[in-house]
Image (cartoon, helix red, strand yellow):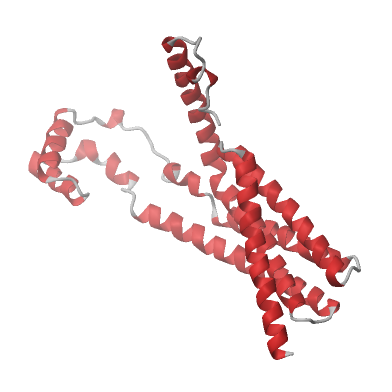
Amino acid sequence: AETRSPYRADTDATAAMAADERIHAEVVRGLAARGRARVSGTFRAAVFGANDGLVSNLALVLGVSGGGVAGSTVLLTGLAGLLAGALSMGAGEYISVRSQRELLAASTPAVSTREAYPYLDVDANELALVYRARGMAAAEAERRADAQLRNWPVPEDIEPVRPDADHDVVGTGSSAAVSSFVFFAVGAAVPVLPFLLGLRGALALVVAGTLVGLALLLTGATVGVLSGGPPLRRALRQLAVGAGAAAVTFGLGLAFGATLG
């Protein structure tokens, strides 16, 4: 959204105006990207949790209802799906984020190695071997080693580096787990709400489907706004995917109910 500019299609705008507007748009896009990066880990867990809760529990409720069971059984199944799914999502998100951070930490050069540079007694060949071990080609490693030795730092030139500075975009395991758990539970509660309010039968299913559809439109539009994409397109995509999954599950529930009943 930040890069869209009316000057590109304006016949009265000069090339300089269009170019200037593109540069300004790129600056705004870069500033927005920094903010998105800081919340991407927790935001991703929240969006995935809410969508999974909405779609999976609606599909579960519709599938069980299609099998012809009583309304109380549908309610119990929906609540069980809410608790099981929220706990599973929270635990899985915690393990996923922690594993990703550990993988990044294991593949990042140690800060202590950088601080030891000024005190090393090495030649170009030894330093070139270090760069080659990191994946550089032989010629590129030699050029890098020569340039590094020509500008060898002194201790005063070394600035402290925070070890996790490059890993903040991933987020923390605990925040991602809590976000995923809470938003999955909230999303999964939506299709169960009509049954909690005493509705039964087709009316409860219609109300549940309508509420979930509205929630999917809202989450899709929110993703579009925060990601810089068209909100309407994101909302309709979210709705189409959720409705498709729910319809397939309801059809399977009808089929199994007719077969087993």
Which residue is at the front of the view, 133 or 208? Answer: 208
Residue 179 in view, yes or no: no
State the residue at coordinates (50%, 29%): 29
State the residue at coordinates (14%, 41%): 141
For this orientation, the residue located farthest to the right is 198
For this orientation, the residue located farthest to the bottom is 260
Quadrant of residue 137 within the rendered picture:
top left
State the residue at coordinates (67%, 83%): 256
Which residue is at the front of the view, 49 or 124? Answer: 49
Q: Position of residue 104 (x, y in %)?
A: 39, 53
Give the total of numbered labels: 0
Which residue is at the front of the view, 9 or 62? Answer: 9
For the N terminus, the image quarter is top right
Q: Is residue 90 left or right of residue 74?
A: left
Quadrant of residue 196 within the rendered picture:
bottom right
Q: Position of residue 82 (x, y in %)?
A: 72, 68
On screen, 81 above or below 244? below
Which residue is at the front of the view, 23 or 133? Answer: 23
On screen, 206 above or below 26? below
On screen, 60 above or below 48? below
Residue 185 in view, yes or no: yes
Q: Position of residue 222 (x, y in %)?
A: 65, 43
Q: Is residue 6 left or right of residue 146?
A: right
Q: Is residue 55 left or right of residue 17?
A: right
On screen, 113 above or below 198? above
Q: Position of residue 12 (x, y in %)?
A: 51, 9
For the C terminus, the image quarter is bottom right
